[in-house]
Amino acid sequence: MTSPVDAIRGGLVVSCQAYPGEPMRDPDTMCRVAQAAVLGGAVAIRAQGIEDLEAMRPVLDVPLIGLWKDGKSGVFITPTVEHARAVAATGVQIVAIDATLRPRPDGSSVADSVEAVHDAGALVMADCSTLADGVAAAQAGADLVGTTLAGYTEDTPKTDGPDLALLAALVHELGLPVVCEGRVHTLAQAGAAMDAGAHAVVVGTAITHPTTITSWFVDAVHDRASAGPESRDH
């Protein structure tokens, strides 16, 4: 049987998440978005929230990477051992956790969550922001590492597009599959991530968040309209 990590090799993982208060923040809606992404060729789905994961797990025939966002600052992606156990209990194949070196709300270590997830029969994706995070996550027993938090902690600047330098460094230093995630908004960026050695690429906003996608087009149209007809003629 192919392992979930091998199943996503060289493929596109689609992140299906909606923010609190948005019309799409509904388990049935996000489940349908996930199914549509799989029809388009996604090799796995990344999603958050126990209800969403419980809705998706029975209907998806690709690996599901699950997480639980709790809070808005600091460590909030599957932040404690109990969060990790709860996500694993939904039956997802991979549990994503914040694997930065920042203190966790329950005082636990990354290794504690890794052990809990492994005991539940699932694998661990370590969401990192720095090379040091990735090295520590590998030592803690993570099964794969992601660049998910690069640019979203005080330790790393936000790059325009994915942090390809961090990706390349993780690929060079670790003996683990490295997933490129974070600000992959174009086909060229996705291709560049694969060229840099990514095991797989995660795209979320650019595929599954219509509010943001609409705002990109609105800004482009407004910019051209503000420039006036003379600039548009050229």
Image: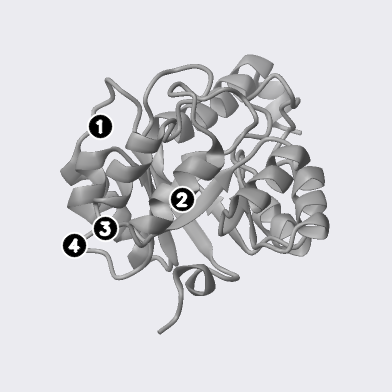
Residue of label 3:
91
Element at badge 3? Answer: loop
How far is the residue under mark 3 from the one under mark 2?
16 Å
Helix, strand, or loop for circle 4? loop
- Type of amino acid at the residue the image marks with label 4: Pro
Which numbered disc flags the more N-terminal residue, 4 or 3? 4
Q: Quadrant of residue 152?
A: top right
Depth check, mark 4 against mark 3: the one in front is 3
Circle 4 residue = 58
Which numbered marker is on residue 116? none
* Mark 3 burial class by Cα count in 10 Å: few <14, some 14-19, many 20+: some
Closer to the chain start, of discs 4 and 1, is 1
Residue position marked by numbered label 2 in the rendering: 115
- Structural distance between the alpha carbons of marks 4 and 3: 9 Å
Front position among marks 2 and 1: 2
Question: What amino acid is labelled 3 in the image?
Answer: Gly
Please tell me whether mark 2 sits on a helix, a strand or a loop: helix
Residue corresponding to mark 1 = 25
Q: Nearer the viewer, mark 4 or mark 2?
A: 2
Q: Given contact means CB atoms under 8 Å apart, are the residues at marks 4 and 1 in contact?
A: no
State which quarter of the image contains the N terminus.
Answer: bottom left
Q: Alpha carbon of mark 4 to alpha carbon of mark 2: how far?
A: 25 Å
Which residue is at the front of the view, 50 or 182?
50
Question: Quick check: 201 above or below 135?
Answer: below
